[in-house]
Image (cartoon, helix red, strand yellow):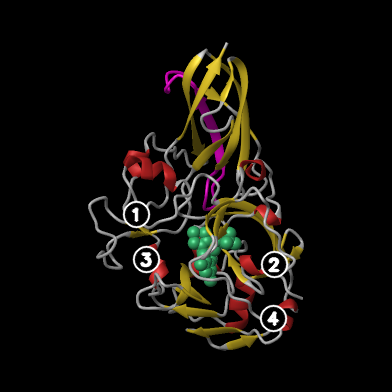
Amino acid sequence: IDLMGIWNKCDEMLVHQGEPYNAETPVDALAAEITPLDAFYGRNHAPIPHLDSADWRLRVEGLVDRPLELSMDDLRRLPERTVVATLQCAGNRRADLIEVRDIPGQVPWGPGAISTARWSGVSLADVLAKAGVRPEAAHIAFTGPDVSELADPAQPFGGSIPVAKATSSEVLLAWAMNDQALPTPHGAPLRVVVPGWIGARSVKWLQRISAQAEPTDNYFQTEYSILPPEADPETAGPGAGITLGPVAIHCAILRPGKDAHLASGPTEVSGFAFAGDDRTVARVDVSADHGGTWTHADLDPPENPWMWQHWHTTLNLPIGEAELIARAWDSTAAVQTESPATVWNPRGYANNAAAHLHITCHP
Ligand code: MTE
Ligand code: MO
């Protein structure tokens, strides 16, 4: 069957680019615990490849005792695992950084380059155990087939994670999303899902896993890094930045909407927060007076550490213009920084500044 054919995009997607396809999840879907498949954000660096799952093979090689070549049938003989996990692009909320200073050539993501699915497949740890990862291996590298024009030199998309994360129970090689076959745009027949880490490490259309002593030298491994503000991303070398791994605590205000006009008085304010890595969200504070006073929002309890948590509260809004601010704390007491200016970086990654929202209230 042609999976692309049965994959419908929700009409409300905020499409930043058609080719490569880059689109963010609309607000209604961000407010749901599990994102419907047709509204799950899409982040691509090259045209979406169409792989025939019958001929497809996964190679497992490098510092392993038993190199493997596995078909989908081979993989399906391993125990099936399911993890509900939020996936978030490192470029999420870049638009707020662009307001501080322009970031040319990068997708101006709002708060919707994030979604949550129920992922099913095999545990990466089980596949690595079959291959026998040697003690000298410290990193597990993933490679897909899609060659991006951005990569220099030209090479397929890839990334790596440390062995400790790769052998944790939450990292999956997934063939299903929300109990349906993984759609082609999301990586069919098989993708990596690295819960709590930036989306770029969850390599789609996975073809090769390699155990190695060092992180991968794939272009995208260090492209996804935080450069110092004065660095020129065109000339910065691979070692110039802080390579991104775990997501940092952040939140978004979903309702009211940006620049909304509404009646003054008691108003429901809601959104989500995502802690990243193996942390949970501990508290979300919301202010309508520039941080003079804060209200603690009602926060959904964590179902597992890999998921976002939604929150809501009621604020008494005065007549006139107002700015709502929301800031989240995680279970290690890390809190979001106040201003996007603090975290501005030349490629516009990992914006975890507090959420700011301008509204106007009428009598
Ligand atoms: N895998 C491949 N092969 N090619 C890609 O361009 N994009 C990465 C990651 N895996 C990418 C990839 C990035 S940056 C993100 S944020 C997620 O996939 C997005 O996954 P989605 O499109 O299923 O939402
Ligand atoms: Mo991403």
Q: Nearer the viewer, mark 1 or mark 2?
A: 1
Q: Nearer the viewer, mark 3 or mark 1?
A: 1
In terms of sequence position, does the residue under pointer 1 or pointer 2 come before the other? 1
Left or right: residue 198 versus residue 263 is: left
The residue that disc 3 covers is 222
**Which residues make up the magenta segment?**
274-294
In terms of sequence position, does the residue under pointer 2 or pointer 3 come before the other? 2
Residue at 49 percent of width and 81 percent of height:
134
Contact between marks 2 and 3 (CB within 8 A): the answer is no
Binning the other alpha carbons within 10 Å of mark 1 as few (below 14), some (14 to 19) or many (20 upward) gives few
Binning the other alpha carbons within 10 Å of mark 2 as few (below 14), some (14 to 19) or many (20 upward) gives many
Secondary structure category for the residue under label 3? helix
Q: Position of residue 44 (x, y in %)?
A: 52, 64
Secondary structure category for the residue under label 1? loop
Q: Nearer the viewer, mark 4 or mark 1?
A: 1
Separation of marks 1 and 2 at Cα, in angstroms: 33 Å
Q: Which mark is residue 104?
A: 1
Q: Nearer the viewer, mark 2 or mark 3?
A: 2
Tell me the kind of residue under disc 4. Ser
| Residue farthest along the left direction in this orientation | 230
**Nearest the eye: 40 or 208:** 40
The residue that disc 2 covers is 182
**In which image quadrant can residue 255 be found?**
top right
Q: Which mark is residue 53?
A: 4
Q: Position of residue 26 (x, y in %)?
A: 61, 45
In terms of sequence position, does the residue under pointer 4 or pointer 1 come before the other? 4
Tell me the kind of residue under disc 2. Leu
Separation of marks 3 and 4 at Cα, in angstroms: 30 Å
Contact between marks 4 and 2 (CB within 8 A): the answer is no
